[in-house]
Image (tube, rainbow, N blue to C red):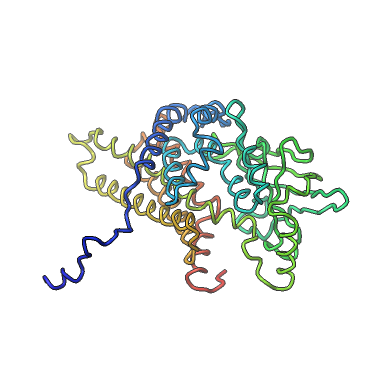
């Protein structure tokens, strides 16, 4: 045994390159965001869930303290480990998922602009997504349609170029758009060549106050009710040529390759944005799951039945143990994918989809377990667990259903175009 120990023990001077310890900066940001979630979001969560309205006062508070805005997002993203953004999202959504989405929903449009835009477009549009501290704004990413949810290739919204005016003319209807219609900046996924399916898509910025874009029906939702969701109608909506993310030259080259039978590369606009955002969405789901787990744990320590605390019953204790295990496992998948994405390591096994799939299903399962531990109390609106359960469900649906995530993972690991 001593010989084996000598062979496997690293020299004292060997550099240790792997650590799961958070830096002091990461801890400080986490605690700062947690304080906002606990002190500002949680006390207001029930009210805004019942009102089903955008919590502008809370967005304003987040802007005033530097939590909402381009500088904040840049700081979170600048972390070379890639962990700061999921840490922030987990804490915010631990506070409340509806208000959290009202604050972070702008990020999807920002991700599209940052991922596909030119330097000039990033500089022009990203600040407008957030507005100012005195007049905060939100942005919307519009990809889904009434007949094109998981199947993004079925998008019918069209973009036609008017060369004489150097304008793009957008026509169509978008559905389930977070901040749709109330956003200062809308990012629209539209088809420039229907025959090419998703390879013929492009992303367009619709600036504030552009004629031809109107809000449609506002959606009354099961959960995330403090986050505005609505249809968006585009009726001969004209935007300047510079609003095509990436520019026309790049689009023309990509379309030409696709028509010749080549691959569309990373130009499939909707999927590129979803791929980048999935670990962050997973972190949001973990925040919801953790909120339910912590509440159920505290409840079980205090609640008495048959002369003892219910935590003393194996059925309850084991359920809580499983909840903790699943939440921590899901977080590790999210952190791995976030680190890979930040460091440009390809998701060869669909690690981004893995993280979102696991986190979303854990959130739904954990909140249901929490309701069960609370018994009848868990089913009432007097206790927050039922709201968390309603909020959790969307994480198995939006930005790719659980079935779509499994399909993506299966294709990645098999190399087979499974349908």
Q: Is residue 304 above or below residue 413?
A: above
User: Residue 301, how many percent across, how many down?
Assistant: 24, 36
The single residue placed furthest to the front in the displayed view is 13
Asked where in the image residue 87 lies, by quadrant, the reply is top left
Q: In percent of the image, x 62 and y 42: which residue is there?
A: 126
Left or right, residue 96 beside residue 313: right
Q: Which residue sits furthest right? A: 164
Q: Is residue 123 above or below residue 339?
A: above
Whole-percent x and y of residue 397?
A: 53, 51
Left or right of 149? Residue 410 is: left
Q: Kindly indicate the quadrant of the structure image that contains residue 38.
A: top left
Q: Nearer the viewer, residue 139 or 303?
A: 139
Q: Number of callouts in the render? A: 0
Q: What residue is at 27 percent from the left and 49 percent from the top? A: 321
| Depth check, front residue: 156 or 1 | 1
Q: Residue at x 54, y 25 (%)?
A: 57
Where residue 90 sits, quadrant-wise, is: top left
Query: Depth check: 84 or 413 in front?
Result: 84
In front of the other: 54 or 199: 199
Of the 4 image quadrants, the one containing the N terminus is bottom left
Q: Is residue 215 depicted above or below 332 in this figure?
A: above
Quadrant where the image shows the C terminus: bottom right
User: Where is residue 268 shown, x and y percent of the image?
Assistant: 64, 60
Relative image position of residue 214 (x, y in whole percent): 74, 38
């Amino acid at each position: 045994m001593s010989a084996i120990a000598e062979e496997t023990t690293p020299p004292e001077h060997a550099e240790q390159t792997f650590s799961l310890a958070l830096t002091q900066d990461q801890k400080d940001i986490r605690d700062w965001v947690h304080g906002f979630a606990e002190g500002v979001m949680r006390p207001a969560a029930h009210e805004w869930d019942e009102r089903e309205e955008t919590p502008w006062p809370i967005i304003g508070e987040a802007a005033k303290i530097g939590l909402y805005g381009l500088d904040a997002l840049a700081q979170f993203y600048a972390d070379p480990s890639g962990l700061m953004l999921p840490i922030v999202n987990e804490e915010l959504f631990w506070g409340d998922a509806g208000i959290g989405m009202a604050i972070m929903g702008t990020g999807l449009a920002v991700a599209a602009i940052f991922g596909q835009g030119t330097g000039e477009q990033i500089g022009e549009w990203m600040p407008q997504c957030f507005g100012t501290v005195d007049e905060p704004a939100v942005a919307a990413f519009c990809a889904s349609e009434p007949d094109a949810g998981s199947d993004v290739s079925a998008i019918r919204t069209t973009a036609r170029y008017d060369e004489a005016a150097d304008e793009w003319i957008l026509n169509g209807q978008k559905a389930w758009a977070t901040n749709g219609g109330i956003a200062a900046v809308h990012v629209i996924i539209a088809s420039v060549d229907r025959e090419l399916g998703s390879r013929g898509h492009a992303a367009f910025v619709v600036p504030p106050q552009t004629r031809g874009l109107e809000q449609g029906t506002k959606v009354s939702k099961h959960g995330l009710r403090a986050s505005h969701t609505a249809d968006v109608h585009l009726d001969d909506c004209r935007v300047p040529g510079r609003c095509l993310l990436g520019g026309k030259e790049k689009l023309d080259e990509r379309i030409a390759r696709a028509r010749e039978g080549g691959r569309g590369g990373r130009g499939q606009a909707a999927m590129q944005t979803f791929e980048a955002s999935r670990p962050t969405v997973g972190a949001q789901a973990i925040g919801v799951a953790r909120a339910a787990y912590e509440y159920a744990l505290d409840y079980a320590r205090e609640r008495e039945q048959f002369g003892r605390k219910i935590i003393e019953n194996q059925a309850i204790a084991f359920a809580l143990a499983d909840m903790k295990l699943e939440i921590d496992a899901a977080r590790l998948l999210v952190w791995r994918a976030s680190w890979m994405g930040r460091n440009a390591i390809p998701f060869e096994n669909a690690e981004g989809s893995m993280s979102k799939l696991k986190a979303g299903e854990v959130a739904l399962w954990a909140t249901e377990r929490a309701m069960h531990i609370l018994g009848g109390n868990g089913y009432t609106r007097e206790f927050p667990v039922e709201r968390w359960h309603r909020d959790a469900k969307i994480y198995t649906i939006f930005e790719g259903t659980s079935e779509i995530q499994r399909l993506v993972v299966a294709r990645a690991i098999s190399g087979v175009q499974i349908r």
